[in-house]
Image: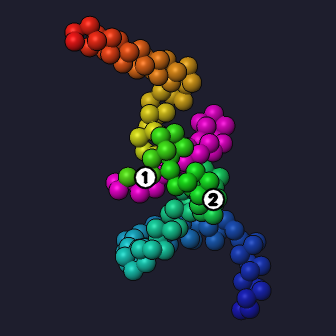
Amino acid sequence: MTAEYQREWRKRNKDRVNALAREWYRKNADKRKAQAKRYRDANPEVVFHTKRAVRLRARGLSVAGYDAMLAAQGGKCAICRQAPSDRYKKLTVDHDHSTGAVRGLLCQTCNKGLGLFFDCPTRLIAASNYIVKTKADRERRSECVA
C-alpha cells in the first residue's frame, strides 16, 4: 500500500477514520494521560511557553505583541504604573468584554478592580469622587479637632 493510496482512502473514509480514532482514544485514555504527563514533566519550559502563547492568542496577541506592549508601557501596569509583584510575575492582558479588543496590560489588582466595576466608567468615576470626598471630609474633621 503506497502513501498516496492511504491518503486517498482516508479522504474517502473520513467518518470511518474519525470513528476509529475516537475509539482508540477512548480505549487508551490512561496511556495517553501518562504519556502527556511524562512529556510535561520532561519539558516544563516548552509547556510553559506553549500555554502562554495559547492564552495570548486567545486575546488576539502574539508573544512578540505582548512583549512590545509591555515595553511600550515600561514594564508597568497601564493604570497604577507599578511593576508586577513577586506573586504575579506577569501583567494581565486587559480587553474590552463587548468587543474583545485588547486595551493594555494591567496588574492583577487593577484588572480585578475594573472587573468588579463591570468596566463601567460611570461607576469608576463615582468611586473616585467618593474616595476624594471622604478623604477631604476626614481632613476637615481632623483640622477641627486640632
Q: Which mark is residue 68?
A: 2
Give the residue number, with chain letter if any, for mark 1: 84
Question: Is 7 in the magenta?
Answer: no
Q: How far from the left and from the top, in percent, is residue 32?
A: 43, 73
Residue 93 position in % (x across, y down): 55, 48
Q: Residues within 10 Å of mark 2 (few under 14, many from 20)?
A: few
The answer to which image quadrant residue 97 occupies is top right
Q: Which residues fall within the magenta stretch?
A: 86-105
x and y percent of residue 76 in the render?
50, 50
Determine whether the residue tagged by mark 1 lies in a helix, strand or loop. loop
Give whichever of 44, 28 is nearer the camera: 44
Label 2: element kind: helix
Q: Main secondary structure of the magenta part?
A: loop
- Comparing 80 with 89, the one in front is 80
Q: Which quarter of the figure is the C terminus placed in?
A: top left
Q: Decide: is 111 above or below 56.
A: above
Amino acid type indicated by mark 2: Ala
- For residue 5, the mark is none
Residue for point 57% across, 24% down = 121
The amino acid sitting under disc 1 is Pro
Asked whether residue 101 is drawn in magenta, I would say yes
Residue sitting at 58 percent across and 51 percent down?
73
**Whether residue 29 is visible:** yes
